[in-house]
Amino acid sequence: QVQLVESGGGLVQAGGSLRLSCAASRSIASLNSMGWYRQAPGKQRELVARFVDFFAPDYVDSVKGRFTISRDSAKNTVSLQMTKLKPEDTAVYYCYIDDRIRLWGRGTQVTVSS
C-alpha cells in the first residue's frame, strides 16, 4: 500500500508563506492525477489544487495567483507553495494521489493568524 506523508504545515501570520510537501512511498512518475484538498473546522473538504492528465494544474478560485502546485517525479513528491496567506486559508491540508484508488495522506495543519 502506497503511503503519503505531508509536511510543512505550521503557524504563520497573514501575508506569509508556507510550502507543503507530500512524499509518496513509491514512484509517482506514471501517475497523472494528484493534488491537495483542505478542510477547515465545520466545513466540507475542498479541492485546492490538482494535476489531471498531465495538463496544466488547476486551482480553486480563492487561491489562484497565490498557491502553486508542483510535482517532482524524481523525489516522488507533490508540493504546494502557498503565498500571501489569509486567515481563511486556515485548515488541515491533505494530499492525494489516484493510483487505481484514491489514496490520502493524514494531513498537515496550516494556521494563519490575522
Image (tube, rainbow, N blue to C red):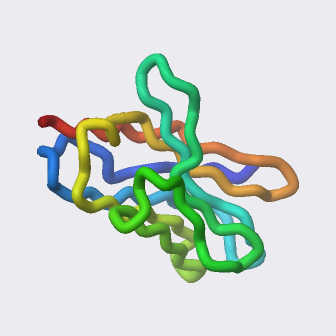
On the picture, is 59 further left or further right than 84? right
Question: Dividing the picture into quarters, in which one does residue 34 lie?
Answer: bottom right
Q: Looking at this rendering, what residue extends furthest in the right direction?
A: 100
Choose top left, top right, bottom left or bottom right for residue 35: bottom right
Q: Is residue 112 left or right of residue 59?
A: left
Residue at left 69%, top 79%? 55
Image coordinates of residue 80 in percent, x first then y, are 42, 62
Numbered circles on residues, count:
0
Q: Position of residue 53 (x, y in %)?
A: 77, 74
| Coordinates of residue 87 in the picture (x, y in percent) | 24, 37
Q: Is residue 26 left or right of residue 77?
A: right
Q: Can you name the residue that lies furthest to the front here?
A: 61
Seen at 52% across and 68% down, the residue is: 77
Residue at 53%, 37% (x, y): give it: 106
Camera-side residue of 4 and 14 = 14
Of the 4 image quadrants, the one containing the C terminus is top left
Viewer-side residue, 50 vs 23: 50
- Indicate whether 114 appears above or below 76: above
Q: Using residue 63 as the reference point, say whether residue 29 is left or right of it.
A: right
Judge by depth and name the residue closer to the eye, 9 or 24. 9
Q: Residue at x 52, y 51 (%)?
A: 48
Q: Residue furthest top?
A: 42
